[in-house]
Image (cartoon, coloured by chain):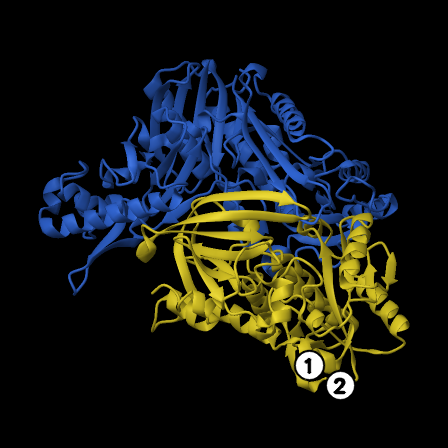
Chain colours: A yellow, B blue
Amino acid sequence: MRKLGIQEIQDIARGAALLGAGGGGDPYLGKLVAIGAINECGPVTLLDPEEVPDDALIVPFAMMGAPTVLSEKGIGGEEYKALFDLVENHEGKKIFATMPMEAGGLNSMFPVAAAARLGLPMVDCDGMGRAFPELQMVTFTIGGIKSSPVGLADEKGNTVIFDTITNKWSEELARSVVMSCGGSVAVTLYNMTGKQMKEYGVKGIVTRSEKLGAAMRNVKNVTDKTPEEAFLEFTEGIRLFKGKITDVRRETRGAFNFGKVVVDGIDDCKGRSAYVEFQNENLAAVVDGEIVATTPDLISLVDTETFTPVPTDALKYGKRVLIVGLKCYDLWRSKEGLELVGPRYFGLDTDYVPVEVRGKGGIR
Amino acid sequence: MYKLGIDVGGTNTDAVIIDENYNVVASVKNPTSGDVYEGIVGAVQKVLNESGVDRKQIGQAMLGTTQCTNAIVERKNLAKIGFMRIGAPASCGILPMVDWSDDIKAVCERAVIIRGGFEFDGRELAPLDEDACRDFCQEMKEKGVRSIAISGVFSTIRNDNELRAAEIAREVLGDDVHVSISSEIGSMGLVERENATILNAALCQVAEKFTDGFAKSIAHEGIENAKIYLPQNDGTLMTMEYARRYPILTVACGPTNSIRGASYLSKVANAIVVDVGGTTTDVGVIQNEFPRESSVAVTIGGVRTNFRMPDVMSIGLGGGSIVREHKDGSVTVGPDSVGYEITSKAMVFGGDVMTATDVAVRTGKAKVGDPSLVESIPLELAEKAMSVIRTMAEDAVDAMKVSSDDSDVILVGGGSIILPDELAGASRTIKPEHFGCANAIGSAISKVSGTYETLVDYDEVPRDDALEKAKQAAADMAAEAGAVRETVEIIDVEDVPLQYYPGNTNRVKVKAAGELRA
């Protein structure tokens, strides 16, 4: 058990941008919400998963909606209580703690605010270990945990809770509510026991995010190696390519942003070419025609000078980036995991091969 | 009729006069003194003398200044303000100015969030709470606050609430109260937009002072018929009245002016512009005669905003950069510089610090000061330093490129004498006439513009129709702002698909600009 204050929040937000793997929304706005809540209500208690009793009720919290809408409406502030009261009534049980659903991107921060405002602890665990575009894409699905009852609340005071027959139906119904409520809602789902959380959650992800963030903050102060070496060492990142963005192609299909960014090599990668395909998050990195990393491993493009992650919606001609691969959570590499979030699910005609094998330890 | 362009820099105040065909008649430099207006008056006197132009024939005067930026960075002369956000019950989870440092947050007497605002599709989020708005204005009146900032959720989609609140503020606080509304200042993204609005409100006194000061200083020089304009960060002009209402829009006009001035002087519409000053070199990109905008959130004095700012890369290389030879034989240039003291400290001017200018003179590249004073520098060392300078400039140019194709490169700024005549990666390296005063010229030739931004579902309105409508709206806005209708051109069209919406919703943004009506 430990406390999360403002400095910790700053680092977690920085690390969450990297775990966003190109998507998940800019954690900046969520950070403001979390800082506001901590300023008013005090630091948040972060629980190690092992500190949670097996029969405790854990309720993950997130915001669902378009990043553009969130960037205008943020969150009202009454949603947390409305939603948690609703869930307690529905479950007929006290909520022991909350936790993030998605530790990558914007949704790394809202559970912190919820915990602060409600005086609940937050568990150091999530269901992705990164960001993914659809709500069934969580490790809990592998564990057979149901997403419903799904609780939704908007800032106006509307709330709804529903049971569904499949997790896919949860996604369907939730989307309709999101649209009716003006493009964003607060959501609780995958309510689970402490035992289930310990069995299927990505444990220690908040701490990992914080360590990544702290390392990124300190990267320039490292004296015995180059900032790039320090960055790769701290993040355990595999250096896949270094280059300059020369083309960005975008397309909207269904409810997603598809696209491809082309990067021409610089420095030791000069004369070579790479591209990264994305669907909200980065899906695959290809260097000189050879795939070097795919989902569910994390592919992040970071600025070559500041090591700030560059999300897919901020990709820009001329920007110099380092393409790094980070190992995903082990459970994603199982047969069930790959069915949910493997390359074939996203329409890539390739089998999954771990990034440390494909990337051959990276370009040196 | 003539145009007078002025640029107040940290070291020099530059002034130029151009005729109605946009030819440069005269350009001068005058030291910027402690009292900015003395510097301006001096520059205006000089340029009038040099050009011999009848002062009554000057119809327009453009002032480029960084006074607002400095006021924010130094937290000086900022006004007390009251801030009102219209958006409850949405947005209450984000407290206004929550990540500002205390010293700048202190400008705000009180911040409130009242009910109102809109959804992304223009539906009402909640009815505007006029009573709360009135109560807040009353409280501000009692506290003697004379500047009010107002933001609203999705006010970029509909600003009815912001306009009504501004009306109420004037009713309560009187017509002379300064009111800043966010829909007229920023784009999508509530936090960044309202931050800019708050800074804008805090700048009202500074803006009044420098616009007044400028008007007086040119009137003092007998220029009585000139209409005064201020260039803004996107390379377009605003009137003095508009600048008083929206002073925040002047931040970053410096690099913008030098980029546009460079483009104009060299008659090149697409190029990379390298502006070498005394301490730093700014490298920017001109696309279709306008600076390429930065795509990342811009921070001013520690406050995050979403301004239209030129995408500029600054490196520590200038005419006054200090040159050092190290034990291992390597040579470095900068990032520290003798700055404005170059005329006393550089070796060519009789000083004892080896600067970039000195090595340029030693190799015969530049001709300033007394070349005999740098003969003591070994030629080999000077050449090594020049090669370092070349590499720094070439790397910066390369970093700003949009493709690996060679691009035209324009060199401007007083310090550009230290750069070689040819750079790698440049199809042409151009150093235009009057290169030293590019920013004052950029200021003089600024255009007037209009920007229109909206959300469109392309499944409901076909893309072509939507863009056409947006272009028309932007052109109308430019004409309204003072552009000659026939010269209005669409200078930027951008549409970005929005995630998670049903159908095919896009954010469409169009900017139009034209020549200023005489």
- Kindly identify which chain the residue marked by label 1 belongs to: A
Q: Is residue B332 left or right of residue B3?
A: left
Where is mark 1, residue-wise? Answer: A198
Q: Residue at x 63, y 73 (%)?
A: A5
Chain containing the residue with disc 2:
A
Query: Which numbered disc flags the more N-terminal residue, 1 or 2?
Result: 2
Name the quadrant containing residue A164. bottom right
- Using the image as rendered, state which of residue B332 and residue B61 is in the foreground: B332
Could you tell me which secondary element the residue under label 1 belongs to? Answer: helix
Reading the image, the residue beneath label 2 is A54
Q: Is residue A218 visible?
A: no
Q: Is residue A107 left or right of residue B364?
A: right
Q: Secondary structure at mark 2?
A: loop
The answer to whether mark 1 and mark 2 are in CB contact below 8 A is: yes
Q: CA distance from mark 1 to mark 2?
A: 8 Å
- At horizontal 69% and vertical 86% (from top left) the residue drawn is A51
* Residue at (42, 49) in percent of width and height: A263
Dot 2 crowding, Cα within 10 Å, few <14, some 14–19, many 20+ = some
**Is B20 rendered above or below residue B292?**
above
